[in-house]
Image (cartoon, coloured by chain):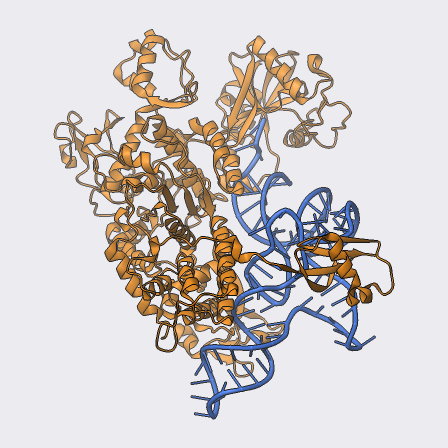
Chain colours: A orange, B blue
Amino acid sequence: MKYNFNEIEAKWQKYWAENQTFKAENQSDKPKFYVLDMFPYPSGAGLHVGHPLGYIASDIYARYKRHKGFNVLHPMGYDSFGLPAEQYAIQTGQHPALTTEANISRYREQLDQIGFSFDWSREERTSDPSFYKWTQWIFIQLFNSWYDKGAEKSRPVSELVAIFETKGNAELVAACDDDTPGFTAEGWNAMNAEEQEQMLLKYRLTYLADAEVNWCPALGTVLANDEIVNGVSERGGHPVVRKKMTQWSMRISAFAERLLQGLEGLDWPEPLKDIQRNWIGKSVGAQVHFNIKDHEGQISVFTTRPDTIFGVSFMTLAPEHDLVKKITTNEQREAVEAYVAATAKRSERERMADVKNITGVFTGAYALHPFTGEEIPVWIGDYVLAGYGTGAVMAVPCGDQRDHDFARHFGLPIPNIFEGVDTTEEAFADKENTVIANSDFISGMPYKEASAAVIAALEEKGQGEGKINYRLRDAVFSRQRYWGEPFPVYYVNGLPKMIDPEHLPIALPEVEKYLPTETGEPPLGNAAVWAWDTTANTVVDNSLIDHKTVFPLELNTMPGWAGSSWYFNRYMDAGNADAFASQEALAYWKDVDLYIGGSEHATGHLLYSRFWQKFLFDLGHLPVDEYAKKLINQGMILGTSAFVYRLENSNTFVSKNLVGDRAVQAIHADVSMVNASDELDVEAFKLWRPEFADAEFEMEDGKYVVGREVEKMSKSKYNVVNPDDICQEYGADTLRMYEMFLGPLEQAKPWNTAGITGVHNFLKKLWKLYFGKEELIVTDEQPSAESLKSLHKTIKKVEEDIENFSFNTSVSTFMICVNELTAQKCHSRAILEPLAVLMSPYAPHIAEELWHKLGHDTSVAHAAFPVFEEKYLVESTKTYPISFNGKMRFTMELSLDLNKEEIEKVVMADERTQDQLGGRTPKKVIVVPGKIVNIVG
RNA sequence: GCUCGAGUGGCGGAAUUGGUAGACGCGCUGGAUUCAAAAUCCAGUUCUUUCGGGAGUGUGGGUUCGAUUCCCACCUCGAGUACCA
């Protein structure tokens, strides 16, 4: 009987769907296990072979856990709001919902073909109103909350109001805007409703504020820091400029410390945790307030080296610093203003590219040293960033290289405050080996002690305090786009009001055009029906806006990461209309046991989702404050591009090895036109594009050989391999096993379709253990000891491999097992039945077919995993490697009963040993019973 | 620059606590089968060699009876980050 994979796979895919084989119940006596994949954005290009890599790995794990008796939740859905569908809508006028729908069905078709064990009854789409209803609900919860730094906990704003009414904000330790003024209870009570509302916005966890944002003109929207790479937009590579705009922001900075600490308990890849740690960027130091000569007020700086305070020889402010205007002297005004104007004009990118150029201007003002009273010149310079710390630094040229460079460039003094170090040529920044000198009361102290002493002295003087700074900034949450979640927000006198959650969802309105309006408003400004009627509690026509009962709605939409920040909780109880998930379902599933996805989400999705989880946990909506116990990053599958070489200024293509040193242009050729031996199908190439129709070819041995290069798999490089084609030609089981066979899951590795025959042949060989030409050849014969050994060796190894996520080595193990069983001519049911179960996580279709052909009438998916028994592996002899000076020369099969002395005696008596020694007497003989023998001398 | 990660045959990769380097697969070579091809099967395949052997896991050192594995220095590639005070 032939292994007819197409027929088998279609049959079982249908069976699984009809029988809901993988439906997970929210109540079970079995222990739970939640296996999650990062859900995809359904792009128009469909899946290529790189996309399912992580899904296959997680599917193997999910299926394995089912065999091991767990109630497994393994869901899938779509992150279906996003830019590409909207860009397409702008070009074609087609509603993004339609293209998204079409793309999703294409994705679903492709996913179904690979035989994943997803519980599709829980499918979710972030662009579905029944889903984003809860995204809007969470937004409202954030708006109605503030962060108590004392308790490190999010709390309802109603509690904050109660504090303000009785105590003002003097004793309050809360996350809030930097410019929040202090006020007393009387002060609060004296404010009118609008003023109070303005004040509360400074505390809310999502707030509306004027902020310098990253504006991307080409995309027509603002971007978050993690959406910008090397100063250009991550998507499309467009320039980004700074712009002041009123935007919704998320106060994620309030959670910086918890996001950092929470990493400790997570079984996530260390490099990924490092990325998050760096992004959060905690630094411990002090805030120092310098008085200014002849001026009111102070200049505050943040420093991680309070111990170097006696080494300060100047100060530098960011050009944007508020004090610059106030303190600049008349003599210096012209120079300062010119410098400030010049810096403002430069884009972020120019400033980044131009790090080595030292620029700055003296303001004419002097700060006063808190201990010596010495006058310190105040400069401005663009090496100081307005957005970090206080936007000002105390410059210690002997201890900081940038300050040193600046001082040398402008001829400023470089006083040395380090014992035994010369700092004339370069700064000394080694904290560990620091001994302070020339520094009054801290002379002779090391870094730690000196820092503590300085902080204490500053606090006493009221001129500073210990301070921890984080690099993590609040995240801009507004996007000037159409295809995203609408905010449940309307405006009364310019102040935002939340729509009552019971009226959610606020559905995305219809618009004529998906572009910004003529007045520069976001696309929702084109909507005719986009106003909130506070009496009817519904969205009504804009013409009804009277600012009394009908108000304008928010025109921005939420960013891509809104839905993905909580979707994993929704799967636990997808479809619930009364809550984002029931408390019972949340209590049962709790968290994700295994999460697989790409590391490119380290500073985006994986940080934001942890933030929302902690927030919802604080308010009692979730049972745990970290949602993914274990996370694995799958590596990227790279494409193997093919190149043809065209002689310059001609239409002649030269085969790779004939190019020599002639001037040629390398052009990507579609990999589908190239065979496994790198030969180009010349006729197909001519038909590929009109410009190649009359191309000439210089062939070698009648063949055109292409060049190969490993690159990222992408349409533009014509190296995309489609999983559908592979499934058609070799079957899903082959695809699954080959993707795993390629190499370690976490590693990037090139795809090469040529190698797939090895895995395919293996499955054919497996099939032949069960079937002869026409019939099942499995017998009830007692298996041989050898066969039992092959099986149990495999059980042990495969189980260990799955637990360690080493799926590539499992595939090898299966190959070895089948090779051995074939050599043994084993057709025993006692071996082949457990083998089918063992294979089922990797190659579920063939396993299901074999299982049923062996007489079972329920799915193999819930069969118990074979139990490893040590007794079948017990050996009486061992083939010892006999080494001389560490080099293996020959082997000897010896009984494992022999002790050290006996082994040594037998080995020394062997002729080959004497040959090797050539008459010499060994200095030493190392015998490790069961392992090796090493003869030294 | 800083922080991580990785360097093993022609290729993908294996070697789980320091113990037979190159498992398994691709590719290649030879053979069987076939009118022929595909498919299948068998044998070989790290390099080098005077066929005894010798060398060999990025480079140089070290620890050890023994190092792909541990330590030190360096080189190359990849990822993250980028004036963060």
- When the figure is inspected, residue A372 is found, relative to residue A328, above or below; the finding is above
Q: Is residue A209 visible?
A: no
In-front residue for pair A152/A778: A778
**In the picture provided, is A457 more to the left or to the right than A324?**
right
| Residue A74, x across and y down, in percent | 34, 48
| Residue A171, x across and y down, in percent | 42, 11
Q: Is residue A402 visible?
A: yes
| Quadrant for the N terminus of chain A in the image | bottom left
- When the figure is inspected, residue A455 is found, relative to residue A362, above or below; the finding is above
**In the picture provided, is B75 more to the left or to the right than A222?**
right
- When the figure is inspected, residue A214 is found, relative to residue A111, above or below; the finding is above
| Quadrant for the C terminus of chain A in the image | bottom right
Residue at 69%, 53% in the rendered image: A929
| Residue A594, x across and y down, in percent | 42, 44
In-front residue for pair A235/A281: A281
In-front residue for pair A227/A48: A48
Residue at 42%, 64% in the rendered image: A832
Residue at 49%, 73% in the rendered image: A676
| Residue A906, x across and y down, in percent | 75, 61
The residue sitting at the top extreme is: A186
In-front residue for pair A389/A597: A597
